[in-house]
Amino acid sequence: MTHPPLSGVRWTSAVLLAALGAGTVRAALRLRDLPVLPVVPPTSAGVPRPAGWRLLTARGVEPDPATFLAACAYAEGEGLRVLDLLPADLAAERALGLLRLVDPARYRWDRLGEGRGAGFAVLVTEEVLERAGVDPAGPRPDPAELLALTRRLKEYASDATGLAVAPGLSCGGPGDPGGPARAAELRAQGLPPGALAAAQLGGLALLAGVAVRQGRWGAAAAGLYWLQPYLVLGGSGSPLRPADLARATAARPVRSLRAGLRTAGAARAAGRDDTADGARAAAYREDLAAGTDRFLEARRPDCPWCGSVRLSVRVRVPDLLQGKPGLFTLERCGDCGHVFQNPRLTPEGLEFYYRDFYDGRGGEGAGTVFGRLGAAYRGRAEMLLPHAEPVSWLDVGTGHGHFCNAARAVWPRTRFDGLDMGEGVREAERRGWVETGYQGQFPEFAPKLAGQYEVVSMYHYLEHTRDPLAELDAAAAVLAPGGFLAIELPDPESRMARLLGPAWLPWFQPQHQHLAPAANLREALADRGFTVVAEEHGPAHQGNDFFGAVALTAARLAPDPDRPWGPPATRRTRALAGAVRLAALPCFAAAAALDTVRTAAARRTDGGNAYRLLARKDAR
């Protein structure tokens, strides 16, 4: 029996049908887990006095007193400090979008999860508002501003934030904006409106194509998409009863197309208006006027680890992370295998190339990346389980304290302190992610902190330092006898480093100054009175080899046209950047699949692109 020529293409319909079916079931299950506020009459006995609580609402939203009291009672009973209230008549598409982002059963306990909500009303304790620097008496926000605020507030109540349906709260309107308002709401949640609109329009085009060309399977996939709002939200027991459910279901393809086009147009318009801050661009022009040679020291002739003069160039690469001017060289020692930046950056150069990466212009993006490393953070924390029950832990190079926040789920009774050069450590202290934040150089703090900690951790920190051996000396001083030093580093001996060359992400130039093989680090620890008690390679692997290579290559071909340290953007540079990003999409998809396979292989063979060591400080 022969098959029609397009029979193989019908797999597209089957895949779409399976994906839509899984998404529909997942949304229905999550909807079932949404808590609903009890109806509490204002005069009921036992209702706690709502002292210490503030209800922040978007403009035009007016909750009744009973809703406020019910929210306070629920939050206090659950031990919450932030509670987003969902109107019972929340618009269908907005409800589906929220259910795609939030798993109500896990939301509260996901310490690194981003704060999500409906953008109508948020109940917050005054203590959280004070720590977050939010004035509850300020002007009432619009929905986008309230969504951004909810995202921020969860950082200050990372395991005490929830959401619930408020039956007495109403949207007061359609509640499903499009165009500029929708684009603003997506940006407020850290989501790219242009990319999401493009994905929405592409998905609609694909569904239309399979519906026309692929018979029953294609029609089934398109029909499931069409009916999804009703299938998820139309049940008799649904805690949400969208006022627009019938209209949203009947006209879904048309409304989705119109919303996608309007959001895409608004995103493009915002992009054209979103020029670099004038003061920032002027500062970069002033820095670059004298050239970049002054940002590099003289090349050294010997290895900083063992003193050998048998050096060879390992890789030479520009700044692919931000596209700032300069060319950087990593050399490898022929005797010990140490890889180091040569010539290395001066302190002035470090300031220039770190600027706007972890804070400023790039701060939000960096925070999002760090917030998605929960599994890695947990693996690092669990490495201590067979060896210690620490009371005190200092995380060096803590950034904004993401690891410390996540590690509390493993070590709830441990005091976590953090140390970092940047202002982020102060923010970590305000959020409560670290108890005490030390801002400065670790070796400078070592005499003050001598013998005070049972654990010191350095996760992807040593490679950023100018003198890693001095950092190890500081750790030995700060640890009490019998304490543990935990270190994680990129592995310069990884096979991917040889395969991908300059596009291997862990080279991370110009920030990484030293990449030490595991044997070198073990020897240096032994010289300082440590015994290595555990070593992991596969579990430390970061699954980004191929994805990172695609990202760096795309950035090399078409840097961000709006970067303030670059030439002014033109239509040509914007068009080139857009074309490269579009062409890279299938490459990113293939890279993600390859990274999945690569990660599975790394776990099975205990070989990856990074390694962890746990060493005990011997009593003397």
Image: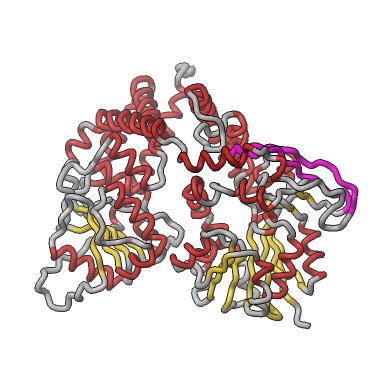
User: Could you tell me which residue is drawn at 25 percent across and 39 percent down?
Assistant: 177
* Colour basis: secondary structure
Q: In this rendering, is residue 226 above or below 294?
A: above
Q: Quadrant of residue 322?
A: top right
In the image, farthest residue toward the bottom: 620
Residue 112 appears in the figure:
yes
Q: In this rendering, is residue 94 above or below 404?
A: above
84 and 389: which is toward the camera: 84
Q: Is residue 205 magenta?
A: no
User: Could you tell me which residue is drawn at 30 percent across and 45 percent down?
Assistant: 96
Q: Quadrant of residue 267?
A: top left
User: Could you tell me which residue is drawn at 60 percent across and 45 percent down?
Assistant: 544
In the image, farthest residue toward the left: 43
247 and 442: which is toward the camera: 442
Rendered location of residue 345, percent (x, y):
71, 48
Rendered location of residue 450, percent (x, y):
67, 78
What segment carries the magenta color?
A: 308-335
Q: Is residue 313 magenta?
A: yes
Q: Quadrant of residue 479?
A: bottom right
Rendered location of residue 360, percent (x, y):
49, 49
